[in-house]
Amino acid sequence: MYCASKAALIALVKSASLTAAEYGVRINCICPGPVQTRQLDSDPSVIRRIPLGRAATADEVANVACFLLSKHASYITGAAIPVDGGKAAGIFPPFGGAIQ
């Protein structure tokens, strides 16, 4: 159900951005991966599946939001931006293993 909901949200952002663009409104979404919390500390298996080898900090996700709100992102709309340490780039074997 999570994957279907996420796909629907991304499709909504893309569709809404096309409608809102003529009014100068930009619509994007941030797709965060695991974010460092006490609960995450208790499950190291999650970290092993992240290509960068660690969870994001809340500040790292917030920095992307701040960028999207800035003039530097004035030509970005309809984007789904992963902030996930490379997880969205594909399925990875455990590090140190051979890719088949």
Image (tube, helix red, strand yellow):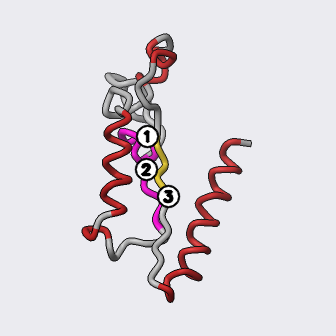
| Amino acid type at image mark 2 | Pro
Residue denoted by label 2: 82
User: Residue at position x 48%, y 23% from top?
Assistant: 46
10 Å crowding of disc 3: few (<14), some (14-19), many (20+): some
Judged from this view, the residue extending furthest toward the top is: 42
Q: Nearer the viewer, mark 2 or mark 3?
A: 3
- What's drawn in magenta, residue-wise? 79-89
In the rendered image, residue 1, in percent from the top left (x then y), is placed at: 74, 42
Residue denoted by label 3: 29
**SS assignment at label 3:** strand
Relative to 69, residue 30 above or below:
above
Residue denoted by label 1: 87
Q: Nearer the viewer, mark 2 or mark 1?
A: 2
10 Å crowding of disc 1: few (<14), some (14-19), many (20+): some
| Magenta region includes residue 85 | yes
Q: 77 or 66: nearer the eye?
A: 66
User: Residue at position x 46%, y 43% from top?
Assistant: 32
User: Residue at position x 49%, y 49% from top?
Assistant: 31
Q: Earlier in the sequence, mark 1 or mark 3?
A: 3
In the rendered image, residue 69, in percent from the top left (x then y), is placed at: 36, 62
Q: CA distance from mark 1 to mark 3?
A: 17 Å
Q: Earlier in the sequence, mark 2 or mark 1?
A: 2
- CB contact under 8 Å: marks 2 and 1: yes
Judged from this view, the residue extending furthest toward the right is: 1
In the rendered image, residue 21, in percent from the top left (x then y), is placed at: 49, 83
Disc number at residue 1?
A: none
| Amino acid type at image mark 3 | Cys
In the rendered image, residue 68, in percent from the top left (x then y), is placed at: 36, 61
**SS assignment at label 1:** helix
- CB contact under 8 Å: marks 2 and 3: no
Q: Is residue 65 left or right of residue 45?
A: left
